[in-house]
Image: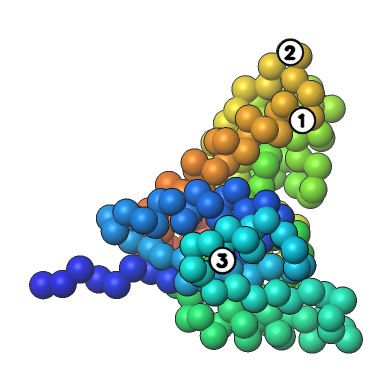
Amino acid sequence: MTDPAPARLVVLISGSGSNLQALLEAAKDPAYGAEVVAVGADRDGIAGLEIAAAAGVPTFVDSVKAYETRDDWDAALTAHVAAHRPDLVISAGFLKLAGKQFLDAFGDRYINTHNALLPSFPGIHGPRDALAYGVKLAGATLFFVDAGVDTGPIIAQVSVPVLDDDTEETLTERIKVAERAQLVEFVGRLVRDGWTIENRKVRIP
């Protein structure tokens, strides 16, 4: 009996690609159960595309400004991702909100990570907002993307203590470490064991 083929991951990025790098490293182990088959970006000239190229992974770029309308961009992104037949699509620092076509195609297998403990502090300033509120625990949330902003069903969360002398920068960096480890762990668990979503509750057998 042969081992099943690894699950196919398409990773979407907008910047340095640190989460992408972590997934590529994890996927080197056949037991992880997944491989990155393509990397998409919303801009040229970013470090994450260089990481993908160095790993021999195909890349594509869909810049919003290259299309007449946001719907046109969404259709192009959907088509480019679909061409790689992904089992799971991962937003790894992808700074664009996907539209209806994309979510219709991949909504039950499109995951994102956020640097706060949702539903608290959604949006792009999670650590800053958490610090300003005075919380004692910050963290990161992995979730399935829906049409809202950071509102989809939660897969996993990890907490990070807030220190008395934390700045937005120091807290953000510590969250990134925990966030990256959580992403790698749960992508592996999802592809190896599968999952169900019922009444917003994500269960991995």
Ranked by sequence position, the earlier of labels 3 and 2 is 3
Do residues under tags 3 and 2 come within 8 Å of each other at their CB atoms? no
Q: CA distance from mark 3 to mark 1?
A: 29 Å
- Judged by depth in the image, the label closer to the viewer, 3 or 2, is 3
**What is the x, y in percent for residue 127?**
75, 35
Residue linked to disc 2: 164
Q: Residues within 10 Å of mark 2 (few under 14, many from 20)?
A: few
| Mark linked to residue 53 | 3
The one of 99 and 173 positioned closer to us in this rendering: 173
Do residues under tags 1 and 2 come within 8 Å of each other at their CB atoms? no
Say whether residue 33 is left or right of residue 197. Answer: left
Q: Residues within 10 Å of mark 3 (few under 14, many from 20)?
A: some
Q: Residues within 10 Å of mark 1 (few under 14, many from 20)?
A: few
The one of 34 and 155 positioned closer to us in this rendering: 34
Amino acid type for the residue under numbered disc 1: Glu
The one of 72 and 105 positioned closer to us in this rendering: 72
Amino acid type for the residue under numbered disc 2: Asp
Amino acid type for the residue under numbered disc 3: Ala
